[in-house]
Amino acid sequence: MENIKIDMNKEAEYNPVAVKEIAYLEKSCFPEDCWSLEAVRSSLKRADIIYDLEYSEGKAIGYFLAAASFDQCELYRIAVLREYRGQGKGKILMERFLQILPEGTEKIYLEVRESNRTAIRLYEKFGFKKLAERKNYYGHENGFIYVLTK
């Protein structure tokens, strides 16, 4: 395994436009449990965060946000606006995410609602395997933990 150096004391390059776009996508895609503007802002300032946005005609329509540390990464969020779903945008975001992972990343983790069959199909298509189940993790709904070993 190659050593990965991440300077946890260094703030990432701050992009206030990305903060606003991701906060908007959060509210639109996760209305019941969206991250606040401040949570998005503080996340994007962290040196271990990787993210990207997908655009259509100049409008942010999707994004991913993850944290990479040493040989592991956790995909916190990947989402596409409802009106753009079913057009391969989630696949594009996942491919981009996997391409920009830090060198030496060996495992990628994520959590997903049991009812989110569309997301589960996407993850499994990319080789993620169900690792565990968290009973009632989302209130009255179970959460699944998936892992991709590279």
Image (cartoon, rainbow, N blue to C red):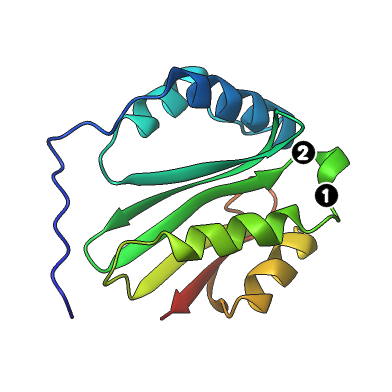
Mark 1 surroundings: few (<14), some (14-19) or many (≥20) residues within 10 A: some
Amino acid at circle 2: Leu
Task: State if disc 1 and disc 2 touch (CB < 8 Å).
Answer: yes
Q: Which residue is mark 2?
A: 81
Quadrant location of the C terminus in the rendered image = bottom left
Asked if residue 119 is positioned above or below residue 20 in the image, the reply reads below
Q: Which residue is mark 1?
A: 85
Residue 54 on image: x %, y %: 64, 42
107 sits left or right of 130 in the view: left
Q: Quadrant of residue 120?
A: bottom right
Q: Residue at x 35, y 26 (%)?
A: 42
Asked if residue 26 is positioned above or below residue 142 in the image, the reply reads above
84 sits left or right of 132 in the view: right
The secondary element bearing badge 1 is classed as loop
Q: Quadrant of residue 21?
A: top right
Q: Residue at x 53, y 70 (%)?
A: 146
Residue 5 on image: x %, y %: 13, 57
Asked if residue 8 is positioned above or below residue 135 in the image, the reply reads above
Q: Residue at x 39, y 47 (%)?
A: 50
Cα gap from disc 2 to disc 1, whole angstroms: 7 Å
Amino acid at circle 1: Arg
Q: Residue at x 16, y 75 (%)?
A: 2
Q: Is residue 134 visible?
A: no
Mark 2 surroundings: few (<14), some (14-19) or many (≥20) residues within 10 A: some
The secondary element bearing badge 2 is classed as loop
